[in-house]
Amino acid sequence: MSPTRLSTVVLDAHDAHVLADFYLRLLGYVVRAEEPGWVLTGPPGGGTGLAFQTEPEYVPPVWPGRGPGEQQMMLHLDIEVDDLAGEVARALREGATLAEYQPQDDVRVLLDPAGHPFCLWVPAAR
């Protein structure tokens, strides 16, 4: 076993609890730990966590990126789905926004309620 392992990805937001609630509904995750301004979630059976931290000075990323020195997208989540259209519709019902720019036919870029881009994608036919 490696002496290091990725345990959690943390996303900043104006309200950690609001954003955590969105991803709990979207991914079916559970709350592992919670305190004021911070929520740790993860898959019910274990695995890498997704945490949310309240940051009063939070500035949403920009998708697609703009010019040098301006706010950029620094990371995004890729979420594999079986039914792209169905899962996009569900994400929109849960509070996501469809991004205006869509670079691929088998991927949909959405923005979570805090403005973080995330991708829903279907694997190529096997």
Image: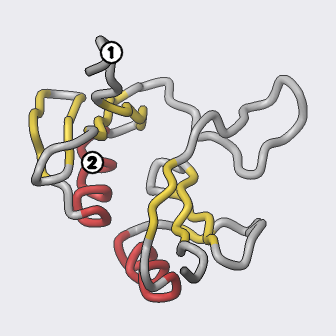
User: Up-down: is 82 above or below 6?
Assistant: below
Name the quarter where the C terminus is drawn.
bottom right
- Residue at the image point whose x is 72% and y is 32% from the top: 71
How far across and down, in percent of the image, does residue 29 sit? 19, 55
Question: Picture quarter containing residue 66?
Answer: top right
Left or right, residue 40 beside residue 92 = left
How far across and down, in percent of the image, does residue 55 sit? 40, 26
How far across and down, in percent of the image, does residue 69 sit? 83, 23
Foreground residue, 102 or 124? 124
Colour mode of the rendering = secondary structure
Left or right, residue 43 beside residue 61 = left
Q: Residue furthest right?
A: 67
Question: Picture quarter containing residue 68?
Answer: top right
Name the quarter where the N terminus is drawn.
top left
Instruction: Tally the marks.
Output: 2
Foreground residue, 59 or 23? 23
User: Up-down: is 82 above or below 27?
Assistant: below
User: In this rendering, which labeled residue sits more in front, label 2 or label 1?
Assistant: 1
Q: How far is disc 2 from disc 1 in space, using C-alphas?
A: 26 Å
- Residue at the image point whose x is 52% and y is 67% from the top: 120
User: Up-down: is 118 above or below 16?
Assistant: below
Left or right, residue 74 beside residue 80 = right
What residue is disc 2 on?
A: 20
User: Which element is circle 1 on?
Assistant: loop
- Residue at the image point whose x is 42% and y is 25% from the top: 56
Question: Dot 1: within a 10 Å radius of its alpha carbon, few (fewer than 14), some, or many (20 or more) residues?
Answer: few
Say whether marks 2 and 1 touch (CB < 8 Å): no
- Residue at the image point whose x is 57% and y is 52% from the top: 117
**Residue type indicated by callout 2:** Ala
What residue is disc 1 on?
A: 4
User: Up-down: is 16 above or below 24?
Assistant: above
